[in-house]
C-alpha cells in the first residue's frame, strides 16, 4: 500500500510550485528600527515612485542589493542634499515621543552614533559644524565675474497703527501698578533671557540653517539652569 499525505501527494514526490515562483527572486528590503541608524548607499541617483497600499512610496536600489522604500518627502530631502550613488549615509527613524505625532526621519552624512560621553544635542551640533566645513570646502560652480545687482525700487517703511484705546489703557494700568518683588525679579530675568536668546540667534544665523532655533533654546536653558544651580551652591 502506497502512502499518500493529506494533500494527495507522495512524500517523496516534488511539490509543484506556481509558474514563475522562485524564492531567490525576492530581494531583501531595509527594515528601519526606531532610533537606530541605518547605513545605506544608493546604487542609482534617483528612486522609482510606486503606488501601494499605504499611498505613494519611492523605491531605491542600494549598493548591497537591498531595496529601500521611503515616503516622497523623505526622498525629496535625499535629492535636495545631493547625495550621489555609492556615497554612504545614514537614515534614522525617530520614534514619536507622544501618540498622534508623526514619525521623524533624520538623514546624516556621517555616523550619528554619539561619541563616548556625548549627548544627542552635542552630537547634532558636532555634525552640523562638520556639514558647514564640508560645504565651505566645496568650490563655487561659477568662478566667473558676478554681475552687479540691479537697483531695486525703494521699499516704503511699514506704518504701525497705534494700539486701540482699550489695549493702551490695560498696558498703562499694568505699568503703573506696583508689582511684588518676586514678579519684578521674574520679569527682569525673562527680559534678560529674551535678549540673550536674540543675541544667540544672531550668532547662530552665521551658520545657516544647520543650527535650529530649538537647539539654541535648549543650550540657553541648559546654561541658565547650570548657572542657577552654581549660584545656589555658592550662596
Image (tube, rainbow, N blue to C red):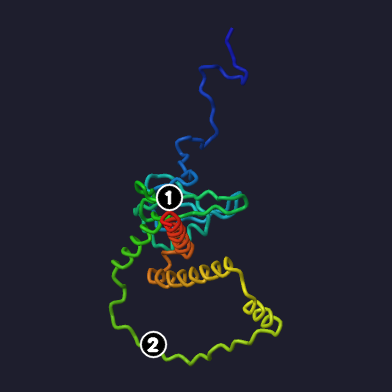
Compute the Cα span from label 1 to label 2: 44 Å
Q: Give me the disc on residue 149.
A: 2
Q: Position of residue 213 (x, y in %)?
A: 47, 65
Identify the secondary structure beneath mark 1: strand
Residue depicted at x 38% and y 68%: 207
Label pair 1/2, CB-CB below 8 angstroms: no
Q: Give me the disc on residue 144.
A: none
Is residue 67 found left or right of 17 in the rendered image?
A: left
Which quadrant holds residue 46? bottom left
* Front residue of 171 and 75: 171
Answer few, some or many: residues within 10 Å of disc 1's Cα (few below 14, many 20 plus, some between 14 and 19): many
Q: Residue extending furthest top?
A: 1
Q: Position of residue 204 (x, y in %)?
A: 41, 68
Residue depicted at x 58% and y 19%: 9
What residue is disc 1 on? Answer: 61
Residue depicted at x 36% and y 57%: 126
Q: Is residue 143 above or below residue 234?
A: below
Is residue 94 found left or right of 90 in the rendered image?
A: right
Which quadrant holds residue 210? bottom left
Is residue 212 found left or right of 147 in the rendered image?
A: right
Of the two numbered discs 1 and 2 in the rendering, the one whose residue sits closer to the viewer: 2
Q: Check the picture and name the quadrant holding the C terminus.
A: bottom left
Identify the secondary structure beneath mark 2: loop
Q: Position of residue 5 (x, y in %)?
A: 60, 16
* Front residue of 173 and 30: 173
Please report whichever mark, 1 or 2, sits nearer to the chain's N-terminal start.
Answer: 1
* Front residue of 215 and 180: 180
Amino acid at each position: 500500500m502506497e502512502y499518500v499525505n493529506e494533500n494527495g501527494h507522495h512524500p517523496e514526490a516534488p511539490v509543484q510550485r506556481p509558474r514563475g515562483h522562485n524564492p531567490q527572486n525576492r530581494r531583501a528590503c531595509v527594515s528601519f528600527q526606531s532610533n537606530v541608524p541605518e547605513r545605506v548607499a544608493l546604487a542609482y541617483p534617483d528612486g522609482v515612485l510606486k503606488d501601494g497600499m499605504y499611498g505613494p512610496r519611492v523605491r531605491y536600489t542600494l549598493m548591497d542589493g537591498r531595496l529601500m522604500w521611503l515616503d516622497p518627502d523623505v526622498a525629496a530631502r535625499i535629492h535636495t542634499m545631493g547625495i550621489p550613488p555609492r556615497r554612504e549615509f545614514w537614515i534614522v527613524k525617530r520614534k514619536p515621543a507622544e501618540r498622534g505625532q508623526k514619525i521623524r526621519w533624520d538623514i546624516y552624512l556621517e555616523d550619528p552614533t554619539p561619541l563616548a560621553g556625548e549627548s544627542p544635542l552635542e552630537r547634532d551640533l558636532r555634525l552640523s559644524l562638520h556639514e558647514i566645513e564640508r560645504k565651505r570646502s566645496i568650490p563655487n560652480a561659477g568662478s566667473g565675474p558676478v554681475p552687479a545687482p540691479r537697483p531695486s525700487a525703494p521699499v516704503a517703511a511699514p506704518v504701525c497703527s497705534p494700539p486701540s484705546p482699550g489695549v493702551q489703557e490695560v498696558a498703562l494700568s499694568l505699568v503703573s501698578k506696583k508689582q511684588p518683588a518676586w514678579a519684578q525679579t521674574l520679569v527682569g530675568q525673562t527680559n534678560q533671557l529674551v535678549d540673550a536668546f536674540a543675541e544667540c540667534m544672531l550668532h547662530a544665523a552665521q551658520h545657516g540653517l544647520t543650527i535650529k532655533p530649538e537647539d539654541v533654546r535648549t543650550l540657553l536653558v541648559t546654561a541658565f539652569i547650570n548657572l542657577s544651580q552654581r549660584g545656589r551652591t555658592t550662596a
